[in-house]
Image (cartoon, rainbow, N blue to C red):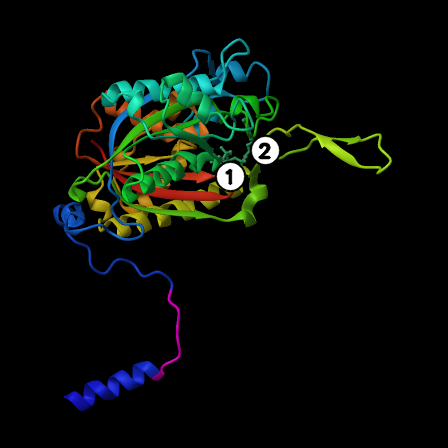
Amino acid sequence: MYVLITALALVVAAAPVISFAPAPARFVPSRARALNAAAAGDAAGSGPLRARLVGTGSAAPETRVTNDNIAEWIDTTDEWISSRTGIGSRHVLSADDPGLASLAARAAASALADAGVDAADVDLVIVATSSPDDLFGDAPTVAHAIGASKAVAFDLTAACSGFLFATVTASQFLHSGAYKTAVVVGGDALSRWVDWDDRNSCILFGDGAGAVVLQRTEDAADSGVLGFALHSDGGGHDKLQCAYNGARRDLATSTGASVTTGAYAPITMDGREVYKFATRRVPEVVAEALENAGLEAGDVDHLLLHQANIRIMEIVADRLGIPREKIITNLNEYGNTSAGSIPLALEEAVRTGTVKKGDVIATAGFGAGLSWGSAILRWG
Ligand code: UT7
């Protein structure tokens, strides 16, 4: 027997190194076992993190633009927009409204109130946005507005994946023990950056912000971020972008130097390509995050995807084998609010009692970058 094992070991050692594509989960523990697995100690990598979600809030502008309203100035119909996207209206910042930082601060303040956490105890504020009021970042303004005077605050840009990426980033600070309390805001005002005469894109986007409060938990069994997976691929950057296109200005100096003066072109999008990307990559990344959490599709109570298109959400649910009834969506009312879409929908689902304490929510963001990611969250 010993000889046989030794011989096998030699054969294996001599075999060429072969790399395999990630294998599907072979061992899938029961939900209860997986949820308690973290109690055995800190998981490494992308498994359970010592962070709990303890409050949520949101804010959206009052001005509401319906599909019929848009049909007043471009060649489209409510029937086309609702059947192709699931969107019925969107909320937009009016020219007289305060900007994105104000929306983000309202969402953050209501999340703190929901959590019963004092702003003075917040260590970290991350604002995920691609459309700040200030190119240098809105997070310090938001932290100041909510009274989080000791918090370090910074923006994070990952387009429609921003909230997901920021939640995982904040959770790492909590998991490491560096910080105890974090506020993560996802918010965008893409109404500022769409071409309102381009029917391919302007029908999709709206403005809004949502926020969560995360706290470090000393008991690893209380983890609220059970597993995650994040990806990006700059090879697809041109499929969806809002690119810098500052005008040339020749400086009147003896060096002959020229510079450009700041401006961005409106959003451009290859809708069909982004659709294909989302329907391929999102089921994969949710499955990867579930595997990292030690869970399977049957353990998911709610599927909360970036609110881009109801057809994308249904295809992802079908591919994962998650019943469509578990999809959380507010797309019909708000459209695609980019980094705001997941926390905006989460807040509504918690407030209306759809999501209850202990529920497992499979979330996924995807969009420009290209970027995509998933986190398996346990509420409360
Ligand atoms: O945060 C991530 C952001 N983006 C996304 O997730 C977008 C993903 N893509 C999509 O959701 C879909 O591709 C869209 C909703 C953008 C478009 O739906 P589609 O079914 O892929 O339509 P299409 O682009 O293939 O266009 C079909 C037709 C075209 O006419 P022809 O060429 O067949 O004559 C378009 O010109 O529909 C036309 N069309 C419209 N018609 C009426 C495009 N936009 C409109 C419109 N109203 N608003």
| Observer able to see residue 104 | no
* Residue that appears at 19% across and 35% down: 359
The amino acid type of the residue labelled 1 equals Ala
Q: Are marks 1 and 2 in contact (CB under 8 Å)?
A: yes
Q: Residue at label 2?
A: 242
Magenta span of residues: 14-20
For residue 376, which numbered disc appears in the image?
none
Q: Is mark 1 on a helix, strand or loop?
A: loop
Rounded to the nearest whole Å, what is the CA distance between mark 1 and mark 2? 9 Å
* Residue that appears at 53% across and 22% down: 133
* Residue that appears at 84% across and 30% down: 252
Q: Does residue 15 belong to the magenta stretch?
A: yes
| Badge 1 density bin: few <14, some 14–19, many ≥20, Cα 10 Å | many
| Quadrant in which the C terminus appears | top left
Q: Nearer the viewer, residue 362 or 53?
A: 53
| Badge 2 density bin: few <14, some 14–19, many ≥20, Cα 10 Å | some
